[in-house]
Image: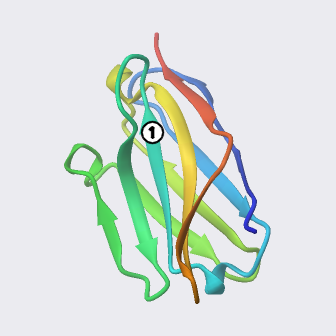
Amino acid sequence: QVQLVESGGGLVEPGGSLRLSCAVSTSILSINRMGWFRQAPGKQRELVATMTSEDITNYADFVKGRFTISRDNAKNTVSLQMESLQPEDTAVYYCHALKRYVGGWYNYWGQGTQVTVSS
């Protein structure tokens, strides 16, 4: 079992910044891929950014150049630095872990943290 706990959400004005963090209950090096997803009201959950255990990153087009995913192996955390936030970035942001076991791949989700961009 892997438990994920997000923190760092909140209210920010357009153009502002926020940093989300996700605490992982196990060694982050054992996770094949960590990532951030988001879900706005009335919309489907969508990928924001991912990072594999080999440090390969992937970003959604709508966040490229504004968001940065990173991880701290010593602290077992993954972060999402968000810059130049816009109202359309308003959503619940979820931490995600993809881990491979002998029996297959398993997905784990955090409880989510609300990000609201508004003046």
State the residue in front, 54 or 104: 104
Q: Residue at (38%, 30%) from the top-left corner?
A: 89
- Spot occupied by residue 61 in the image (x, y as percentages of width and height): 20, 50
State the residue in front, 1 or 87: 1
Q: Residue at (37%, 50%) from the top-left corner?
A: 48
Residue at mark 1: 38
Give the color scheme: rainbow, by chain, secondary structure or one colour.
rainbow
Residue 96 falls in image quadrant: bottom right
State the residue in front, 84 or 3: 3
User: How many numbered markers are drawn?
Assistant: 1
Residue 55 falls in image quadrant: bottom left
State the residue in front, 83 or 41: 41
Amino acid type at image mark 1? Arg
Q: What element carries label 1?
A: strand
82 above or below 75?
above
- Spot occupied by residue 95 in the image (x, y as percentages of width and height): 58, 52
The crowd level at tag 1 (other Cα within 10 Å; few <14, some 14-19, many 20+) is many
Q: Residue at (33%, 24%) from the top-left corner?
A: 88
92 above or below 83?
above
